[in-house]
Amino acid sequence: MLKLVITLVAAATAGRTVRAEAAAVSVSGSAGDFPAGAPRYWPKFGGTRDVKLLDGTWDYGYIDWSAPGGFDSMSPSFKPSMGKTPDSIAVPSCMDVVAGGASGYLGRRGVAMYRTKFATPATATATATTAVAVAAAAPMRLQFQACSFYCRVWVNGKEIGDHRAGGYVAFWLDVPSDALHPGADNELFVLADNRWNATTAPMHTGGDFWHYGGLMRSVELHAMAEQPVLWRAYVMPTGSDFTLPEHETSPSAVDITLQLSSTADAGSTVAFTLTFDGGAPAAHGGMVTKNGTVVISNVAVPNPSLWSPEEPNLHTLTVAFRGGEVTERFGLRSFGVDKATARVTINGKITKLVGWNHHTQWPVTAASPTDAQMDADIVLLKKGNANYVRGAHYPHDPRMMDRLDEAGIVFWSETIGPSVSSANTQDPFFMKYQMQQLAEMIDNAFNHASVFTWGWFNEGPSNDVDACPAYGACNDYARGRDPSRFTTWADDKDMRGKCYEHATLISFNNYPSWYNGQPTSWWNSAADAVHSGSVNGTLGKPFTISETGAGGIFEWSNNATDVKWTLGYQAKIIGGDVDVALANDHVSGITLWHFYDFKVDNCGAQWPCHGRPGQENNTHCQYDHAPPTTFAQLESEGPPNCTYIEINGRPGGENHKGSLDFWRRPKPAFGIVAAKYAKANTKN
């Protein structure tokens, strides 16, 4: 590959990150509204549904991938007593963050060991309103919002389970009574392995971004009981299946699925109350299915208000059952397809969706952001006039989805899976965990009003007819579970895909004028082909641009000509992409790649790199000062400016296609796109 070395001069806007506006932002329903010690995201819990965060400082140890003899994370002979945890670490955090998350610095791959303690009640307790008691040493449930890549868990030396279905999706494990010490401290030991391995981490197939590892998100402790308790309540607007004639565009009622913590009540009738928006409780009853669910249909919502990007109204539903309470937040909204134009509609109104792709990477914290960092990104998205975000390339933090709900920003939620091969899709072992991951993603994101499509297999093997059954399995599961939303994947096969029948939303990735000689007007031919049905399986389905864009190095702003990698070159291409998307009535939406510059991987699933240094192995540019690793340093020193960089496929180990740089400083493209996005729905 031809390599060009350039010397850079810091852009005039280099210096501090955009923080002042974000500091003043108050996001309704965010961290300040949750009780101390409870999760800082929805749902909320009350009564005997006692839920505590185990976040904080844990004991910690680490074994590098290069350690002599290696380490078998699945060894049946391993016991927590063998795991050394001489250090400490904050949970949540990333085990492999280096240089404040800056690109070009090689993160660690290996095995992390975490140890902490939690207490269980010493005696049975009962509430004043129920005879049901939470007994001493009653069973518990642990929920991990993310443990990456492979996770294995013990309580008091007893192994309670593991997780292989992707490191970015939430999952839970039951802790049986006989594993607990009543009235005493209990030891929780977690092993997290962030090495690439098709057995321990089959979902991590590669992809052009750094896959972070460890206990990256919160850990929750749920008190259970001998009888089943209410785990979650899933709320879907009634009549929201847009494929049916009776599709309701202004829903005022909901279908509710109560998920109990076990199937022990199957076949019996149970009683519970429903309370909307803190109003009067209403008594209900229902039969428990063999799956431990109770389904209640067409329940009217008092004083209903629709959720939309313009008015993101949200409702709450509190379900009381056996002394415990779960409060879910949801939105009344209806996604659909305009029959005349095949455009996406929200509540019956044609809406042009405009925004960016968004990874989970932040300065200092990497994939474990603070509330303030997420608030700041929402401020910037709104400043960019975005009403749409694609969650690349994995399930996202529930705190971020809470904020998208509140901001009225539509969200694409997808399973992890870049670099999925046709062989993967035909492998029963791989598909077992893919379907588990999909189910867990939907479990945890179902009630978020902003989620408008479920996705999978980014740039996967959709051009191979033998892979289509896997696409069909994902579509059938998602549609069967949730007919209110679209199903899709980001397809890069240049209209040669074979599996489009298994999608309800058609989405293409392409980079005209960046990776190829096609003009940005290529998007017109793609959109028109999908609309006409000349691409098999697309007729009558909306079309979105899921990825497009160009790279621009933040500091390269003063070149005499707008050559490739300059900010001027980037802005010209991105501006052209957006112009086509806004002008073409066959394009329902666009998410530019990417919102900000981000750290890429180091040879991906071929770790360790063989015969080459890798994209992150000391490839960073020369900075005017070292990247800050604390917020205090970032505040006092500001972001580092690149003064010298080697141009290759990923200069400095970074994907530079962001409209902002990694430190959230805007490039010219950001302002240009924001101005165009502001007019996206003026004629609709």
Image (cartoon, helix red, strand yellow):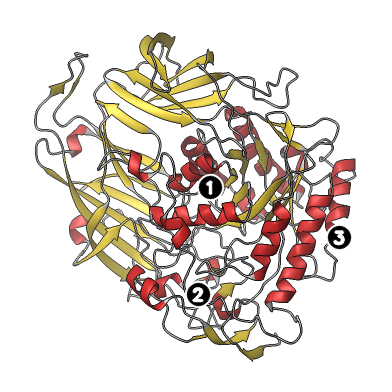
Badge 1 amino acid? Phe
Q: Quadrant of residue 149?
A: bottom left
Number of disc labels: 3
Residue topped by disc 3: 521
Regarding mark 1 in the picture, which secondary structure is present there?
Answer: helix
Residue 411 vs residue 555, the one in the foreground: 555
- Closer mark to the observer between disc 2 and disc 1: 2
Q: CA distance from mark 1 to mark 3?
A: 42 Å
Residue 103: numbered disc: 2
Residue at 74% across / 75% down in the picture? 569
Q: Amino acid at mark 3?
A: Ser
Query: Is residue 462 left or right of 240 when viewed as pictured?
Result: right
Could you say which quadrant of the image residue 310 lies in? top right
**For residue 429, which numbered disc appears in the image?**
1
Q: Residues within 10 Å of mark 2 (few under 14, many from 20)?
A: many
Q: Amino acid at mark 2?
A: Ser
Which image quarter is the N terminus in? Answer: bottom right
